[in-house]
Structures are given as structure tokens and as C-alpha cells.
Image (spheres, rainbow, N blue to C red):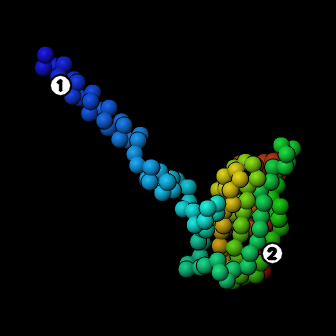
Amino acid sequence: MRKITTLSIILTLLATLALAACGGDDAAEDSGSSDAPVSTESSSTETETDSGSTAGDADSVVVSAQDPSGSGEYKFSGNEFTFSVGEKVQFKITAESEFHTFTVDDLDIDVAIDAGDTETLTFTFDKAGEYELICIPHEALGMKGTITVK
């Protein structure tokens, strides 16, 4: 009889732990706690990539990560950019209907954008050069661009 009681207690504890791990407070779920960047607006995220920058004094650039009507053509609308050294730019990047990235490896830029979302990146260009912009999942399908800093 003692084995049944001990087994019952263990099963009850395991069930309680499982419910606590899976359940939880709705407020915790609504707090935005996930692996995604912290959202500063309802559908955008500001990613600071230079020390202490704010979007208030940055030039604004709108980029659309497109996959038009299932055509198999993947592109950035706005894929050739030229900036000056020291210029601060706020990119507003929107993904149409699929997950995309806005990635410039040489500048340590890697922004993930979920389908239908807009992400905001503020970046100060501090070194001259020509940099390749890619969408990681669609690079082989031609989703590339160039950022030139003079």
C-alpha cells in the first residue's frame, strides 16, 4: 500500500509541475517574453546598433522585403543605398507575406522580420565601403542589395 501512495504523490507532483510549466499567468504571456527582439511599437522593433543613438535625428529609409504574389521573385524594394560616413539612418523594414532578414554581415546587421511585420533599425555608418545586403533564406533566389558608404 505504501508504494501506491508514494507513486500517487510523485505522479501528482509531476502533473502539478507540468501544469505550472505549460499554464501560467496571461500577463506573462502578453509581456512579449520570447526570443524575438523587444517591440517598442505595436508592430515594429527598434534595434540600437550604435552607442546611445535614437531614431529622432536619423534619416529615414523605407525598405520592403517582397515576395510578390507567389511569383518566386524575392527582392528588396530599395536595394541600392548610398550613405556618408557618420550618417545615422533609420531603416523601416517590412516583410510582405513571408519571413525575411535584412542582413549585412560586414556591418553586424541582422534583423529578422516576420510575415506582415515591420521592424525598425537605427544604424550609424562609421566606415566607408561597399557592403552586401542579403535576405538569408532567399539570397540564392536573388534577394540581395548593396549599401555603399562614402
Amino acid beneath label 2: Thr
From the image, tell me which residue sits under label 2. Answer: 82
Number of the label disc, if any, that sits on residue 6 = 1
Q: Tell me the crowding category of disc 2: few under 14, some 14 to 19, or many 20 or more residues within 10 angstroms, Cα based.
A: few
SS at mark 2 in the image: strand
Q: Residue furthest top?
A: 1
How many numbered discs, if any?
2
Q: Residue at x 19, y 19 (%)?
A: 4
Task: Locate residue 95: give its quadrant.
Answer: bottom right
Indicate which disc residue 74 carries.
Answer: none
Point out residue 114 in the picture as x, y percentages from the top left corner.
66, 52
> Which of 99 and 30 lies nearest the eye of the viewer?
30
Q: Amino acid at mark 1?
A: Thr
Residue 23: image x %, image y %?
Answer: 41, 41
Find numbered disc 1 in the image and state the secondary structure of the residue it sits on.
helix
The x and y percentages for residue 8 are 22, 24
Q: In which quadrant is the N terminus drawn? A: top left
Instruction: Name the side, left or right, on which 95 lies relative to 42.
Output: right
Q: Is residue 128 visible?
A: no
Extreme front residue here?
26
Residue at left 81%, top 71%?
Answer: 81
Relative height, residue 12 to residue 121 (above, below)? above
Q: Is residue 11 above or below residue 71?
A: above
At label 1, counting other C-alpha atoms closer than 10 Å, the crowd grade (few under 14, some 14-19, many 20 or more) is few
Q: Could you say which is closer to the camera, residue 108 or residue 71? A: 71
At a point 56% along the width and 55% down the height, the residue shown is 36
Counting from the top left corner in percent of width and height, residue 85 is at 72, 82
- Distance, label 2 to label 1, CA atoms, is 71 Å
Left or right for 58, reference 27: right
Please tell me whether mark 2 or mark 1 is closer to you in this view. Answer: 1
